[in-house]
Image: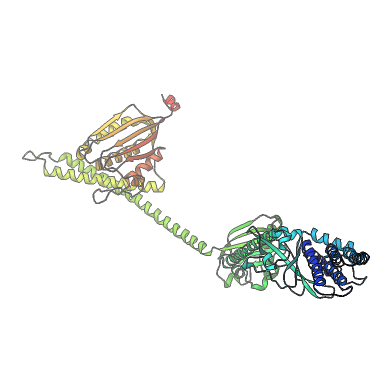
Amino acid sequence: MRAHALHLSVFLVARPAWARHVLAAVCAGLAWGLSWLLPLPGALPILLSLAAVLVAALLGGAGPAWLATFMGALSIASRTATQPAATTLLELSSFLAVGGLVAVLAGRRGVVAVPREPPSSRPASSHEGLEAHLLRSLGDAVLATDAHGVVRYLNPAAATLLQCPEQEVIGAPLAQVLRSRPESGSFPIRHASKPSAWSPWPRALRRRDGGELPIEECTTPLRGLGGEELGAVWVFRDATSRRQFELERSQLLARERAALAEAQAHRELMESLFFQAPVAIAVFRGQDHVCELLNPQARVLLEVDGAALGKPLRDVQPEMDPGLLRLLDEVYREGMPFSAREVPLPTLPLTSTALHSKPQRYHDVSWQPWRDARGAIQGVMAVAVDVTGLVVSRRAAEDLAGELREVVQARDEFLSIASHELRTPITSLQLQLQFLLRMAPAAGTEGTTSLVHRRVEATLRSVAQLHQLVATLLDVSRIRAGRLDLHRERMDLSSLTQELVSRAQEDAAGARCPVRLVVSEPLYGNWDRVRLEQVLTNLLSNAFKYGAQRPVEIHVAREGGFACLSVKDQGIGIAPEDQARIFHRFERAVSQRHYSGFGLGLWIVRQIVEALDGDIRVESAPNAGSTFIVRLPLESASTIDATG
């Protein structure tokens, strides 16, 4: 747009119609009053009225010029009323002709006071109308001020943004029209001498309804045809979407910075883990296995430094075992991982002096294909874990275990031989004591048991305990050596139990534990009679020892395909945490100070029962007695029919 066209539009619109007509009336009234008050000779009153018409045309245009013309005509008619009619008519006609011509010229030119422009620089009236339409049709708000900061023009877009009509804004100071929040900066009254760019940040404009509207603005100076400063033009527009965009952009940038910081932190963490890992990690790229990454452990293992990066592995380690290089080629080509355990160190960097100048070391090696995001193989990742200490420790443990096995085997053999050799003299001693017991007088002179008889009985009991101990040691050595001999035969568990209970009546009487036996039916199975006697004897001995001089119940019954033998006492009982432990070697649930024994009886019982394809368990509670339950498989129906 051109500055002089905008200047003309501003000052044509700036004066309301009533003000221009009042100004014309004042000028005409002033000329009328002067012609009445001052004795002006000749045609001076007419010239004074014409001057008023010219001023009205200059300041107001055609309408005010016509008003001044009619008022001047009335003034002339009232002043020349005493003159001849022809004179009055001539003066009125001349005045009306000149005033009407001035009004017509003012109407055609718009404002007669505008200086005449050269034909080359004055635009056509159609162009002036087009510029006015363009200003009113702009989507951006346009506001023009004079040199003192007073608003002289605004387009409809500006009136919409400001929420006030055009009539209220024209003539108001800019500071009253454009009000902003203090922290967003105020609109300056004085404008820059050069056009400014759009404001980098939206300004908060206070609207008439009390709300705020973010706007962006720019200013440009308004100059006349001669370059003089006439005012300024303010262009502003709604920046809500821009502010939202800037807010979203700042949030996005903040998230991006946070993501970059997090990625950097993760990268630093990965680098620290990579370089501080206690294992050797190497990454090779391409089919030539170019050294891409080597952590300090890998450099020590390969005997290279940082200069190896970017070089093929064959160049940095020309002495490497060709077999390992072929394996690397296969991992890269086939994409199948490879792993090996306890690889000797010289097989990695194989040098001529490695076997003689360095101690042997071992590594667990794993090679994995290195793939990109699309799954294409880029190279090979190698990890080597030094397991030299584990290998040395394991071999030492294996040697120690071998020595311990030899020692234990020697101990078991000694116990087996010693127990076997001790059984012969102990058996002979038992026979001799039994002979002496039969030969010794049962009663003395006073009707009491003789001293010799009592001593022989006590010695015979001690020898029986010694015989039982030797038998137990022999069983332990046989079980440990896996030589527990079983002589299976078809037998009845019910009759065997009845026989053993009758034999144990003397021991039960000595322990003050009455025995109650309940047998439902004969129960046949393929078992070892001697070993079953050993099981029953051990269970009865425990019941008498821990039964607290209370009755002991023995039940023999059928449970499906099993024969079930239970021995129940009412003694001290066993705590739940000890019930599994008592079936182990040398384990006891009571103090050895109060109850003698080695803790081997129940362990031997379990070994015998499991060897006979059965099982044993205990049901007990402290001070509520214990029930030991043995289950043994019965003879099958087909076997019964075959033998029947």
Q: From the viewer's perspective, is residue 462 above or below residue 399? A: above
The answer to whether 200 appears left or right of 53 in the picture is: left
Picture mark count: 0
The answer to whether 243 appears left or right of 399 in the picture is: right
The answer to whether 619 appears left or right of 194 in the picture is: left
Q: From the viewer's perspective, is residue 613 above or below residue 362? A: above
From the top left corner, tell me how far across and down residue 87 is, in percent: 92, 67
Colour scheme in the image? rainbow
The front one of 447 and 420 is 447
The quadrant in which residue 602 appears is top left
The front one of 381 and 42 is 42
Query: Which of the image's four quarters has the N terminus?
Result: bottom right
Query: Which of the image's four quarters has the C terminus?
Result: top left
Q: Is residue 378 visible?
A: no
Q: Is residue 478 visible?
A: yes
From the top left corner, tell me how far across and down residue 496 is, in percent: 31, 32
Q: Looking at this view, name the residue that lies furthest to the left.
A: 446
From the top left corner, tell me how far across and down residue 156 is, in percent: 76, 58
The front one of 588 and 38 is 38
The front one of 407 and 591 is 591
The quadrant in which residue 70 appears is bottom right
The quadrant in which residue 228 appears is bottom right
From the top left corner, tell me how far across and down residue 51 is, in percent: 85, 71
The answer to whether 586 appears left or right of 264 in the picture is: left
